[in-house]
Structures are given as structure tokens and as C-alpha cells.
Amino acid sequence: MVVVEARGLGLRTRRGWVFRGVDLAIRAGEVHAIVGPPGSGRTSLLLALADRFPITEGEVRHHAPAALGQVAGVHEPDPELTVAEHITERLLLLGRRVVPAASATAARGRPRFGILPWRRRTGQRDAVMAAIESAGLGAENLLDPARRGRDLTPVQRQVLGLTLAALSGPGLILADDVDAGTSSTERALLWTILDRVASQGIAVVVTTREVEPPSTPIIHRLGEPPADPAGQASAEEETAEQAPAEQAPAEEETAEQAPAEEETAEQASAEEETAEEAPAEEETPEQAPAEEETAEQAAAGTVPTHHAEVTR
């Protein structure tokens, strides 16, 4: 039996599509998990399936009543009320009463003033525990009737939410972030409890970041990019990483050639300086006429025969 079905479900905001084109058919006794990272639209889709959130397109059809479990900020335990008060309040809303055993005895003819206060408290506790047990979760030892909502651990909050939802006898129970703030042992326990709920013929839909073995719900993933664009992006990143690596040797060679070019430039400067010094050597031919003049003077007799030595 199909409990709830969605056809072409979509939600669009000013920032774009939160989810779109969701098709679901959830049957009695099935456990479904909406998986995705924070911000992927898990809670919005969950509330839309519970008919508690407006959608942009598509439709949701319910074939059985739905009840919300723990949904932070939307449907969660009152921090000031005890577990017993939560149970009592829910039963009163359902038109049922939690009647302690002592009060029931007094109603049959015994005077109420004869009931001791501690017996009233004990009877109230027993009645609350009986109501928790009637939910069929098998988690009575996880809930202390005297504990207030603000003192409950994350797993206890989830269990209380599931218990309160189950008391109304729904065909569908929905709970959000069942793995938030829990250890691996607590998560395994929660999946066991969810399976117990489903074994009663109730469809279960929860959101979670991931599903750990050996849990085997029907998984619907949100927030995952298509396979092809992801593959192309990876290929482009690899190409971008390889390109600098391939160009690096060429740049290194250029850097190595730079000193060689500098050396060539230095050599060119040296050659220019040598070329500038060349005229000094050309002065030697100019000295030749002077020597010729000396020879002519000697022939004319104007140069003395003896002259001073030239120190070289």
C-alpha cells in the first residue's frame, strides 16, 4: 500500500531551486532516508512530504495520516516539560487520558484522600511507561519520565519524538537529522528503532547525512552534482595542474640561458674596450717619422756622436 507519493515535486526560492523533479512512492512498512549535506534541502523536502511546507511545482498525495517526529525548530520537545508531561499532553490531545492505577482504584469507590502522594506519583510513572511501551519502539529504558526536555540527549530527543508520533497511530512518521550529535552506537540503535516502527506497518521517512551499515533503508540523495560535469571538472583541473609543470622546464632553460647572454654582453664590452685601446698602438707608426728625422740629422752632422743612455 502506498502511503504517500510525490510527482514532479519542486521548490524554488529567489536563490534558485532547492529541489526539483522529485518522484517518490513510499509504501507501508518501508524506511526511506533522504541523504545529503547540510543546505541540500533535506528538511524542506521532508516537511513537504508531510504537507507542512509549500512547494513550487508538483504534488504530494497522502493515503494515510502523517505525524512528525523530531524536527529541530519546527517540532521538538519543550525544554521545560518532562517526558511524562509530553506523553500526557499528547494523549490528552488525542482524547485519551493517563490514569494512574491508584486514581483508578479511588474512582471505583475508595476515598481519594486515602491515596498517598508517593503512590500517585508511582501510579503516574507506571501509566506513562505503559504509554511509552504501547508505542512499540522497545526503547522504554531510554526515556526517564522525570527528565525535562532541555536535559535530553540527541538520541533521547529522537526517541521521544518517535514515541509521541507513534501514539497517534499514523501511517507515516517523518523525522529530521536522526544522526545529528549521536555516536555510532547510538545511530545503530536508532536505525533498529526505526525498523521496529516500520515493522508495525508504518512508513518511515528520515533525513540524515549518511547511512552506515548494516542499516538498509531506501536512500534518496540530494545535493550531488551530475556525474559528467564532475568528470569534466576533474579533467580540467588535472590539465591546469599539468600545464604549469610542462612549461616549467622551458622557463628554467630560459633562466639558464640568461647568464650566458650576460657573459656575451660582457665579452662584447671587453672587445669594445680593446678596440678603443687600439689607437694607442697606432701611435707607433707616428714615431717612425721622428726616427727618420733623427737619421737625417745624423747625416747632416747636427747630432752629437755620443749621447746619454736611455733607460728602458
Image (cartoon, helix red, strand yellow):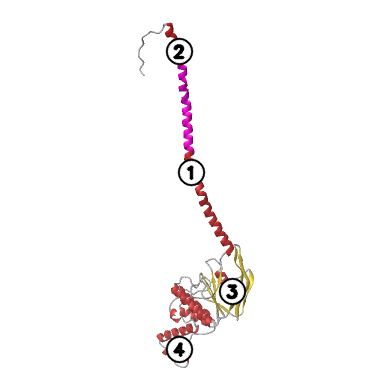
The residue lying at 42 percent from left, 8 percent from top is 298
Classify mark 4: helix, strand or loop. helix
Mark 4 vs mark 1, foreground winner is: 1
- Dot 3 or dot 4, earlier in sequence: 3
**Residue 196 place in picture, x, y as percent:** 50, 81
Classify mark 3: helix, strand or loop. helix
Magenta residues, start to end: 261-288
Real-space Cα separation, disc 4 to disc 1, in angstroms: 94 Å
Mark 2 vs mark 1, foreground winner is: 2
Classify mark 2: helix, strand or loop. helix
**Residue 251 place in picture, x, y as percent:** 50, 46
Mark 3, Cα crowd under 10 Å, few <14 / some 14-19 / many 20+, is many
Give me the disc on residue 255.
1
Mark 1 vs mark 3, foreground winner is: 1
Q: Farthest residue toward the bottom?
A: 109
The residue lying at 53 percent from left, 57 percent from top is 238
**Residue 272 place in picture, x, y as percent:** 48, 29
Real-space Cα separation, disc 3 to disc 4, in angstroms: 40 Å
Give me the disc on residue 49.
3
User: Which quarter of the rendering shows the C terminus?
Assistant: top left
Real-space Cα separation, disc 2 to disc 3, in angstroms: 123 Å
Mark 2 vs mark 3, foreground winner is: 2
Of 106 and 288, nearer the camera is 288
Query: Is residue 253 located in the magenta-colored stretch of the structure?
Result: no
- Dot 1 or dot 3, earlier in sequence: 3
The residue lying at 49 percent from left, 41 percent from top is 257
Pointer 4 residue: 101
